[in-house]
Amino acid sequence: MENILSLLIFIPILSAVFLYLLPVNVKIIRYASFGVTLLTAALSLWMYVHFDAHDQMQFVEQYTWIKAYGISYHIGIDGISLIIVMMTNFIIPLLYLSFWHLERKGYWLNLLIVHGGLTGAALSLDLILFYLFWETMLLPVFFLIGLFGRENKNFMSMKFTLYTIFGSLLMLTSILYLGYSSYEHSQVWSFSIFDLQTLQLDRMTTFLLFAAFIFAFSVKIPLFPFHTWLPQTYAAAPIGAIVIMSALMAKLGVYAIWRFVFTLFEDLSLELSEFFVSLGLFGMIYFGIAAIKQVELKRLFAYSSASHLSLVVMGIFAFNYYAHLGAFYMIASHALSSAALFMMIGMIYKRTQNLHIDALGGIVHQAPVFSAFFAFFALSIVGIPLTGGFVSELLLIIGAFEYNIIFGFLAATTVLVAILFIFNLMQKTLYGPKRLNEFSELRLYELLSLIPLALLVLTMGVFPSYFINKIKPTAKKYTPQEVNHVK
C-alpha cells in the first residue's frame, strides 16, 4: 500500500471537515468519527505488521510542493516515529469509546483534526511540513479547552496557546534561517532534514538555532522550567484534551528532539548531554515531589506525567543504546497507562462531580472492578513487574549507569518518588474510609475502552521482545562509541 502514510494523516482531517459541513445530528457524527478512528487503527496495524526492523525510512512519499523554495511533501516512518503513530491510532479510538455518552459535535470533530495533526507531525521529513502539522495540533486543543473545559477555561486556553505559539514562532524563524542558509551554501532552497544536517554553521548560530528548537519542544513535553502552564491547564481542560496532551503531544515533543535536534545539531547535543541528563533527573524529582503535594487528581497526574517525561528526556540525552531503548519503550508504555488513568479520572468526575482526593475514598467497596483497573494502571506507571513500565524503567536505569554511575544511582532512587505518590493516592481514594454515598461500577463501553489498554500494557511487559525488535535498529542511532562525559 504505497500511500498508507498519507491515508493515516488525511483520513481523519478530511473526515472532520466533511462531517462538519454535513447537516447531520451528533449521533451520526459520533458513529462516523469512531468509524474513522477504527479505520486508521486497522491501517496502522497493517503498517506495523509490514514494517521491517531496520533503521531506514520506510513507506516514504515525496512530492514537490513549492519548488521555488525547496518545500516538499516528504513523509516517512522509522522505528521511533512508528511508536508515535501506533500509540495515536490505538489510543484515540478507545478515547472515543470511553466518552461515548458525550453529545458534543465539536468534541468529536476536534479530536479527529488533532489525530491527523499528530500523525502528520510524526511522519514529516520536511521542516516546513512538520511545522504546519505541529501547528495543526494546537488549534483543536485550544477549542477543546475553551469550549468544553472548566475552571477559568478561557484564560487557560489562551495561556496554553500563547506559550506554544511563542515557542513555535521561534522554531519557525530557525527553520526559515536554515532554509536560507541552505540556499547560501548551495544556491538551492531546501527544508529537508537530510539536506540541512550537512550545513556548516558557526558556533553561536548553531547554539541559537538549537535553543529555539529545544524551547519549542520543551514547552510541549513540558520540561523544567517550561512547565508553568501545566497544572492550571490540566485542571481547566476536558479529559479528552488532557489525554491528547499527556499521552500523545508530550511524547511527540520528545520525539521531535530526537528527530530534528539530534539530526540537525548532533555535535552540540552530544556536548550538552550532561546538562540535559542532569535536568531530566532534576525534573523527575521536582515534578514527583510536586505530585505528592497535590490534592486534586488531574493536577497530580499532570505532574506525574511531567516527572516520567523528564526521565525519558534523560534517556535520549544519555546517548547510549539501553537508555534510548528504554526511553522509546517508556514513550509507548507511559502513553497507554496515562491515557487510561486520565480516562478513568473522567469517569470519576462523571460519577462524583469532584476530583479532590480528600473527597474520595473507599471506592473499592462500591466498585471493585473499577478499583482493580485504576490500581493496575497506577502501578504500571511506577513500573511493577509484568508491565511495559517495568521494562522501560529497567532499560533506562541500565542506560543511566552506562552513562555515569552516579546518575545511574540517582535514576534508580528517584523512581521511588513515583512509588510514594502513587501508593499514597491509592490509599486515600481506593482503600481509604468510605466518603461517597454512591459510586457506580464500570459501564460496558467504559470497560471496553480500558480492556485493550490493560492487555497491551501487560503484553508489553510479558513479551517485550516483539515490540523492542521493531525499534532496536533505530535506537542504535546517535549512540557513538565515545561520548565526552564523566565516567
Image (tube, grey):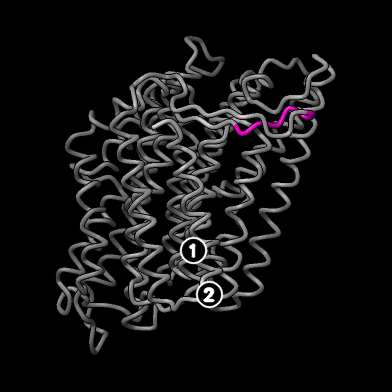
Spatial CA distance of label 2 from label 1 is 9 Å
Q: State the residue at coordinates (59%, 54%).
A: 227
Decide which of 70, 164 is in the foreground and name it.
70
Q: Which mark is residue 48?
A: none
Q: State the residue at coordinates (36%, 27%).
A: 471
As drawn, the residue found furthest toward the bottom would be: 437
The picture places residue 230, in percent across and down from the top left corner, at 56, 60
Residue contact between numbered discs 2 and 1, judged by CB atoms under 8 Å: yes
* Residue on which the image places disc 1: 241
Q: State the residue at coordinates (67%, 19%).
A: 195
Residue 463, quarter of picture: top left
Q: Which secondary structure, mark 1?
A: helix
The magenta stretch is 68-73
Identified by mark 1, the residue type is: Ala
Q: Is residue 60 left or right of residue 405?
A: right
- The quadrant of the image that shows the N terminus is top left
Crowd class of label 1 (few under 14; some 14 to 19; many from 20; radius 10 Å): many
239 vs 185: above or below: below
* Residue on which the image places disc 2: 149
| Residue 121, magenta (yes or no) | no
Identified by mark 2, the residue type is: Gly
Residue 279, quarter of picture: top right
The picture places residue 180, in percent across and down from the top left corner, at 82, 27
Q: Is residue 157 left or right of residue 358?
A: right
Residue 260 in sight from this viewpoint: no
The picture places residue 144, in percent across and down from the top left corner, at 54, 68
The picture places residue 414, in percent across and down from the top left corner, at 39, 43
